């Protein structure tokens, strides 16, 4: 097993570095600025590799992530599931490490190593003690830049992914959410499952996966993000050394890939999907097109979401569950992509009650679109947004995800104070305007349950 205590520092220039933002704690009683709570710095290396860090004084561990700006929406139909498949395979060995080495090296120091695939990016991430940052940097960079994509591991992981798809297919909530997205986005790659289908996974070859890897995992399309107990200059030296060892810095004249672009409005459709299953409950998702990433109206939409179904005090929770006892689960949510987004209500209930629950949801959405929300609801919704924002960024992992994503999708990196200012500025009129725009569109609906219950739906 390869054990790296540190990587040699390079004598070459580190690249172009700048401080993006500085977060401060609360001001003192004399009005003086509070102490620095965190500082975000960014370096671009020759070849376009971006390194972004957020130093958090007092932290004793670090969250690290190596991101690539490729997700399942980038796949052609013949490559369905390739992004997620590749994520699995990159854990299976490099020229320097076996699959066991990759998993054991961080486990030996109490660290964690994992990855996730989204529709617009993929992230390989680790969480380690501050003293083990060099080990984690080397493991992440090695597996992402130097995978061998061995044929026998491709076949092994094919079976694992087919098991994952089968497990996913056994969960009614997962199935109905995928069906809703497919109903909303139709043939668009956004409408397809991140895992791919059984047919597409069986059809993928090692050659296709290798070619996808070599095309997409280039330095100009990669971002290394780190948050917590990290020193920016040290992280830059470690990452640069690891990429030099792998000869992965690429053409030094290349700049970072531009932020993901998309049509101003991705095509959506209005459709209803019924999925027959012998389940005890009916699961459903009802929703409409909404705003894309970076849209300034996202703050008003966040408030609206909280009012409609964002917690136990929301309208739908109170009406459907508390007053009428029609369902145990009822909530709303908003999702944004580049050039597309949606707002939806989801829940589950007994088959005999699905008509009533869907009717209440439709009526409540129409009511909010017509009359807006109350001042009390506005303030409560804003308070929920403020709390979830601040508490959600208490740990280094959440900070790493925030800064990493900011390099790959529109919206920019805002300080917590800037985000709180945007939330505080949301007005009743803005929420009403957003409700009228979003809630009056023709909805898409996905419903899963027994045939008898589905037959009764209009």
Image: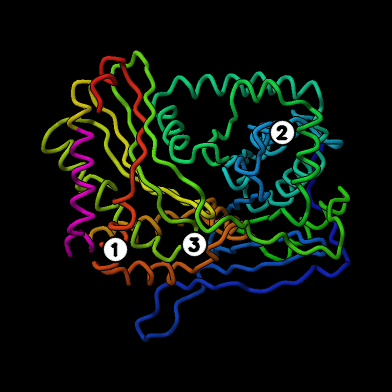
Q: Nearer the viewer, mark 3 or mark 1?
A: 1
Q: In terms of sequence position, does the residue under pointer 2 or pointer 3 come before the other?
A: 2
Q: Is residue 366 magenta?
A: yes
User: Can residue 402 be seen here?
Assistant: yes
Where is residue 275 shown, x and y percent of the image?
A: 39, 22
Front-most of residues 219 and 449: 449
* Label disc, if present, on residue 91 of the rendered structure: 2
Q: Position of residue 72 (x, y in %)?
A: 61, 40
Q: Which residue, given by chain and number where applicable, does mark 1 sit on?
A: 433
Q: Nearer the viewer, residue 127 or 353?
A: 353
Q: Quadrant of the N terminus?
A: top right
Res. 231 image quadrant: bottom right
Which callout, 2 or 1, points at the residue further toward the start of the chain? Answer: 2
Q: Label 2's element? A: loop
Q: Give the crowd class for mark 1: few <14, some 14-19, many >=20 residues within 10 Å.
A: some
Residue range of the region highlighted in magenta in the rendering: 357-378
User: Residue 454 vs residue 237: left or right?
Assistant: left
Q: Residue at x 66, y 18 (%)?
A: 159
Secondary structure of the residue carrying numbered label 1: helix
In the displayed structure image, the side of residue 205 where residue 394 appears, left or right: left
Quadrant of res 381: bottom left
Given this view, does label 2 or label 1 mark the residue nearer the observer? 1
Q: Residue shown at 85%/55% (left/top)?
A: 250
**Marking on residue 294:** 3
Report the magenta stretch's main SS.
helix
Residue 300, magenta (yes or no): no
């Amino acid at each position: 097993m390869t054990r790296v205590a540190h990587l040699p520092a390079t004598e070459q220039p580190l690249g172009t570095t700048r401080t993006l933002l500085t977060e401060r704690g609360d001001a003192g009683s004399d009005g003086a600025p509070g102490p620095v709570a965190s500082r975000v710095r960014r370096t671009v290396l020759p070849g376009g590799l971006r390194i972004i860090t957020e130093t958090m004084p007092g932290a004793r561990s670090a969250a690290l992530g190596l991101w690539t700006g490729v997700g399942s929406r980038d796949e052609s139909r013949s490559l369905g599931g390739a992004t997620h498949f590749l994520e699995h395979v990159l854990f299976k060995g490099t020229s320097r490490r076996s699959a066991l080495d990759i998993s054991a090296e961080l486990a030996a120091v109490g660290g964690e190593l994992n990855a996730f695939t989204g529709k617009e990016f993929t992230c390989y991430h680790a969480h380690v003690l501050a003293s083990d940052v060099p080990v984690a940097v080397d493991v992440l960079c090695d597996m992402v830049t130097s995978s061998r994509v061995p044929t026998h591991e491709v076949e092994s992981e094919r079976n694992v992914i087919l098991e994952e798809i089968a497990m996913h297919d056994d969960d009614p909530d997962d199935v109905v959410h995928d069906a809703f997205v497919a109903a909303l986005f139709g043939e668009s790659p956004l409408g397809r499952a991140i895992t791919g289908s059984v047919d597409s996974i069986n059809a993928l070859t090692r050659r296709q996966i290798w070619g996808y890897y070599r095309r997409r995992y280039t330095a100009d399309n990669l971002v290394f993000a780190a948050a917590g107990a990290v020193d920016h200059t040290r992280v830059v030296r470690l990452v640069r050394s690891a990429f030099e060892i792998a000869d992965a810095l690429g053409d030094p004249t290349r700049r970072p890939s531009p932020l993901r672009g998309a049509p101003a409005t991705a095509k959506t459709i209005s459709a209803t999907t019924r999925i027959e299953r012998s389940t005890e409950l009916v699961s459903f998702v009802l929703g409409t097109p909404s705003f894309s990433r970076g849209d300034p109206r996202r703050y008003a939409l966040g408030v609206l979401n909280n009012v409609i179904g964002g917690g136990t005090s929301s309208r739908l929770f109170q009406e459907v569950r508390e007053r009428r006892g029609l369902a145990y689960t009822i909530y709303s949510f908003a999702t944004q992509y580049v050039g597309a987004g949606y707002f939806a209500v989801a829940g589950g209930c007994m088959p005999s009650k699905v008509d009533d629950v869907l009717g209440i949801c439709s009526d409540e959405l129409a009511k909010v679109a017509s009359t807006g929300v109350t001042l009390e609801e506005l303030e409560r919704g804003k308070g929920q947004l403020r709390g979830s924002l601040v508490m959600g960024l208490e740990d280094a992992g959440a900070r790493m995800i925030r800064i990493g994503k900011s390099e790959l999708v529109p919206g920019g990196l805002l300080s917590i104070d800037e985000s709180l200012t945007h939330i505080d500025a949301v007005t009743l009129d803005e929420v009403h305007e957003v409700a009228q725009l979003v809630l009056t569109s023709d909805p898409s609906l996905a419903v899963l349950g027994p045939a008898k219950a589905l037959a009764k739906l209009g």
